[in-house]
């Protein structure tokens, strides 16, 4: 039985976040909603990993969003799906080493939507 690699997922962990307007941010996980799970290869597709949704926090991309501590933090991103579940419109997270693959999948999904 073929198994996919299961990567760790912890509160405080650095991840990459693609926002709904398809901008990329460095982010930290603030909550994990479940456990990553693996599934075997089947007639429906290859072996893989299913990651839970996460809550995350990141530094605002708006230069004018300042407070007494510096650039404001964005903390209202909750239940964000992993790119393996949904990529078409952004609004997903990935491990840093998966960003190139996630970006490619998003572009392909957007191309399919436009056709």
Image: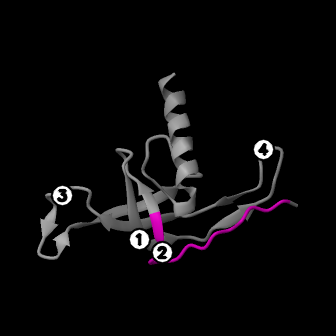
Earlier sequence position, callout 3 versus callout 4: 4
**What's the distance in space between the residues labelled 4 and 2, CA to CA?**
32 Å
**What's the distance in space between the residues labelled 3 and 1, CA to CA?**
20 Å
Q: Is residue 12 magenta?
A: yes
> Quadrant where the N terminus lies?
bottom right
Residue 82 at what x, y percent from top left?
Answer: 53, 57
Secondary structure beneath label 1: strand
What range of the chain is rendered magenta? 2-15
Please give left or right for residue 104 compared with residue 42 in the image. left
Above-or-below relation of 24 to 13: above
Callout in the foreground (3, 1): 3
Earlier sequence position, callout 1 versus callout 4: 1
Secondary structure beneath label 4: loop
Cβ atoms under marks 1 and 2 closer than 8 Å:
yes
Residue 95 visible in image: no
At horizontal 46% and vertical 71% (from top left) the residue drawn is 14
Q: Circle 3 is placed at which residue position?
A: 63
- Tally the numbered discs: 4
Q: Circle 4 is placed at which residue position?
A: 44
Callout in the foreground (3, 2): 3
Cβ atoms under marks 3 and 4 closer than 8 Å:
no
Pick the residue in front: 83 or 39: 83
Q: Circle 1 is placed at which residue position?
A: 28
**What's the distance in space between the residues labelled 3 and 4, CA to CA?**
46 Å
Callout in the foreground (3, 4): 3
Cβ atoms under marks 3 and 1 closer than 8 Å:
no
At horizontal 47% and vertical 25% (from top left) the residue drawn is 114
Secondary structure beneath label 2: loop
Q: Quadrant of residue 49?
A: bottom right
Q: Circle 2 is placed at which residue position?
A: 13
Q: Is residue 32 magenta?
A: no
């Amino acid at each position: 039985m073929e198994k996919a690699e299961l990567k760790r997922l912890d509160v405080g962990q650095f991840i990459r976040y693609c926002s709904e307007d398809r901008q990329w941010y460095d982010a930290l996980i603030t909550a994990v909603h479940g456990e990553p799970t693996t599934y075997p290869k089947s007639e429906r597709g290859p072996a893989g990993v299913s990651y839970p949704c996460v809550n995350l926090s990141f530094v605002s991309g708006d230069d004018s969003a300042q407070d007494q501590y510096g650039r404001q933090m964005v903390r209202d991103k909750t239940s964000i799906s992993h790119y393996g579940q949904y990529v078409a419109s952004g609004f997903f997270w990935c491990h840093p080493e998966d960003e190139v693959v996630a970006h490619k999948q998003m572009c392909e999904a957007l191309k399919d939507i436009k056709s």
